[in-house]
Amino acid sequence: MFVLTEFPLPYPTYALAPYISQETLETHHGKHVATYINNLNNLIKETSYEPMPLEDIIKKSATLPDDKNIFNNAAQIYNHDFFFHGLCPDCNTQIPKEIIESFGNEENFKTMFKNAATSLFGSGYTWLVRDNGALRIINLANADTPIVHNMKPILNLDVWEHSYYLDYKNKRADFVDNFLNHMVNWDFVAENLKQ
């Protein structure tokens, strides 16, 4: 059985203020993620999924239309956990060299990432992934996740409205700017690049 403490925030709920408020983190992690965990536990109880690690549940359920609800809840847990670990207070501001080289310069990377994140229609995530050796910025809708597309996740931004609406209302672009300029855990990104 999955519990919220298996997917803890790596910092206190107040740590990302003023860019993400304590209220937003308490709602986002403490309510939204908790609901996905509760749903998944109920869906996999006494099934072949129950003993599986989360990533295995995602990969297996992604191929089975009858298990779409299992996939959606499992992938949302994974995507959220990845997002929260990609944030930090008082972050190292040094973008890894590989990203700068892949996108030409830091500003070009940020512009491309912001354009993707602000153009995603509806809900989902903007990802930096390694795809066949190359770094790419992609948008995936709803609960879709790179690990079912043979891509290595490096960084993601949750652009579901619940991730920013309490703090930014309809100003998603401001949320993206603050994410890129003040909140990205570049050490986490650098570790993902090495793997």
Image (cartoon, helix red, strand yellow):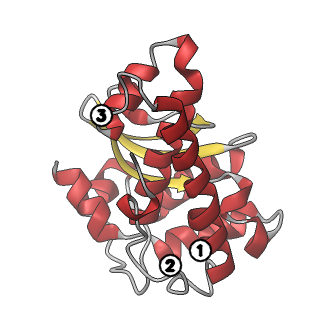
Which residue is identified by label 2?
182
Q: Is residue 23 visible?
A: yes
Query: For mark 1, what is the residue?
Result: 178
Please state the horizontal and vertical placement of residue 3, each as a whole percent of the image.
43, 56
What residue would you read off at disc 3? 51
Quick one: label 3 or label 2, which is nearer the N terminus?
Answer: 3
Q: Residue at x 56, y 33 (%)?
A: 72
Q: CA distance from mark 3 to mark 2?
A: 38 Å
Label 3 vs label 2, nearer the camera: 3
CA gap, disc 1 and disc 3: 39 Å
- Residue reaching furthest to the front: 46
Q: Earlier in the sequence, mark 1 or mark 3?
A: 3
Mark 2 crowd level (few <14, some 14–19, many ≥20, 10 Å Cα): some
Q: Quadrant of residue 93?
A: bottom left
In the displayed structure, does residue 167 sit left or right of residue 93? right
Relative to residue 80, is residue 187 drawn left or right?
left
